[in-house]
Amino acid sequence: MSALLESLNVQQRAAASHLEGPLLILAGAGSGKTRVITHRVAWLVKEAGVSLSEILAVTFTNKAAGEMRSRVAKLLGAGAEEVWISTFHSAGVRMLREHGEAVGVPPGFVIYDDSDQLSLIKRILKDSGTDTSFITPRTVRSRIDYAKSCGLGPDAMDIDRGDPTGEEVREIYRRYQAALRSSGAVDFGDLLVETVSMLRNHSAVLDAYRRRLRFFMVDEFQDTSPVQYELVRLLAGPAENLVVVGDDDQSIYGWRGADVRNILSFETDYPKARVIRLEQNYRSTQVILDAAHAIIEKSPERKKKRLWTERRGGDLLELIAAKDEVEEARLAAFRVELLSNTVPRNEIAILYRTNAMSRVVEDALRARRVPYQVVRGRSFYERAEIRDLTAYLRLAVNPHSDADLLRIINTPRRGIGSRTVERLRSAGDEAGTSLWSVIWDSHKPLDLGQAASRRVRSFAELIRALHDLVIKGSSAYEVVKESMIRSGLVAAFESDVSEEGRERLENLTELLAVAAQREDEGYSLVDLLDEMALLGDADEKVEGERVALMTLHAAKGLEFDVVMMLGVEERTLPHARVFTDTAAFEDPEALAEERRLCYVGFTRARSKLVLGMARTRWVMGSRQVRGASRFLGELPAELLGERSRAQPRYERACGSLGRHESQGVEVHPSKEEIILDYSFDQRPEVEEVAPRPGGRVRHSLLGDGEIRRVDGFGHNARFEVRFDSGSVKRVLARYLQVLW
DNA sequence: GGTAAGAGGCTTTTT
DNA sequence: GCCTCTTACC
């Protein structure tokens, strides 16, 4: 057997050495699916004589793509970068940049993100005089996004019968799409829809890709949308060399148009498909898997499977039951501090349902001086000053981008006020052109006063100058630098002596540094802008010895020794959204997705899982009473640590007992439910294991011993231990198990 | 045309 | 509670 496959188990081996035809790999959490994909790439190249550039592997996040790239490189060495590994969206960008003109997408297109979408939709709603009490910009956006995730344009979009706003939304979608085109812009959805339509309607383009690419792999298949599925189906074509890897239990993006049915119907779409199940889990202890299984087995419509592990037993689950979210965060921070004596801090993650929940946790960690990092990749690029600078950069590439032009035409202040802007806009609407055409190309005199005309003219010349830099091929660094200075942004912040002004200036300089770095890596300005647009929330890497804070969604695909999941309450997890307005009815599909989200959270943990909950929680300006999550009630009691089990004396109440106040409404009154008594002792489950001189520890090779001294903390903490054998050694804490 | 204060909406999750 | 957008006033 090839040495490449030796390290794999039987199923993994079968999957990794699959050559041609469709294959569905049902890969449970922690079953080594990335390993399988990377080994298959290596196997195809080394053993099957496939050339590197014939392989396309699509992942969900840039981080996952990066991870895969580096692991493939390890297996294959030089040349590995020829394998095309990217996200669906990045693949779309690349294909559209190459051939998008066939479908009316110019090569210099800019990518509008969700807030650009929103402002565009707001403008359209305003211009069309739509009554926004029923049709809000956000609902329009989500309906457009949803239609696009199904690959549907305005004419084809589904409208529910009896939906009074449907036709209006369709018309807004139409205008929205027209506005994107006249701006030379695409949104995230277009990156997929336009790519598919390009491949479908231009056989020469499709054939070119099919000649070049022959083997396709899709990771996280359970989270692909119909349009994404269609994209790979088109590329794979009749050869059907398509391998998809997924886990229906981890489908958590239904709200974004992902369709679990993709995974359930793959076998129908490809009758010749082989199916391989990976059920051995290499990540978690049995205790954690048992807990996860207790949650997921109640999920409707799943492909039956049960993970198993060789890691028998393991620490029991801990429960932090707090009176409110502040106390929950404090206890969690305290627990993290204790744990970081024995676990490297970057092996601890705190997960929560919504981003808004991070704040209290951050406060608590800061109070204890525990280093942490909130994983929210986009936050830097969401800063106003960065968005402003980005708008200049995008205009330098494509001056027709109205959203960008409107954003900065008066930023920094240059005396072009709303009246002037409105006049320009109506001129643009009349001519059916971009604003840039109005202020630069049009030879008609503008209906503006003398002063306003002068200012607009000078603004147009500024943009033209930046655009010329791009045309004559200036480097990314240069365009960023010139944009910063000539736009007046730097001057505006320099004159602002406040702390905030200084910080904003620093952020701009930071972006300049990024540009310089990327330029060294061979990026053009367009590449840099693409990266900025496509960077995802989960893409940020946690650097150094820091506890990671992120949403459950962002944690998908990651693993940690210790996972603390906070807010395991009704209306937080499952989220209140699951319920209809009155909270009396719940949407079974939404509930099932929350269940899978809970499962994803649990299965991130290798060795220790801590659950947190608060009796009351501050939500959107009011304090709400919360009850323990139903998911908690589904856990077998023996999986909970003794103190967690005994202290919050939780009772299972069936039927009539199950009454719970929450926001003054009854929550799932007919269901089995836990009633928690919160008046218990708050000491954490295993407080006594906090290492201190005199305590006992165990080392896997040296045996048991007594701590004599503790030096440092966190990853580098060392204990001086006198082992029972008589020897005294200084040992890194992370190699020791603290007994008491 | 610019600024400051007030109103109103919002928080599910993200490429 | 916080952020964004609107409005009233300079």
Image: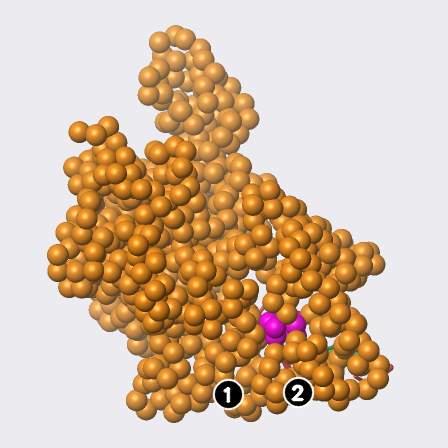
Chain colours: A orange, B green, C red
Chain at tag 1: A
Which segment did they paint magenta? A400-407
| Residue type for callout 1 | Ser
> What secondary structure predominates along the stretch shown in magenta?
helix
- Where residue A468 sits, quadrant-wise, is bottom right
Residue A96 makes an appearance in the image = yes
Chain at tag 2: A
In-image side of A285 versus A272 (left or right): right
Earlier along the polypeptide chain: callout 2 or callout 1?
Answer: 1
On residue A427, the disc is 2
* Residue A709 image point, x, y percent: 51, 19
- Give the residue at x 52% y 64%: A107
* Residue A692 image point, x, y percent: 48, 25
Front residue of this view, candidates A444 and A260: A444
Residue position marked by numbered label 1 in the rendering: A133
Q: Is residue A375 above or below residue A112?
A: above
| Quadrant of the rendering where the N terminus of chain A is positioned | top left
Label 2–label 1 contact, CB within 8 A: no
* Residue A592 image point, x, y percent: 28, 64
* Residue A435 image point, x, y percent: 65, 78
* Residue A263 lies within the magenta run: no
Disc 2 and disc 1: Cα gap in Å? 28 Å
Q: Is residue A398 above or below residue A326?
A: below
* Residue A404 lies within the magenta run: yes
| Residue type for callout 2 | Ala
Q: What is the secondary structure assignment of the residue under circle 1?
A: loop
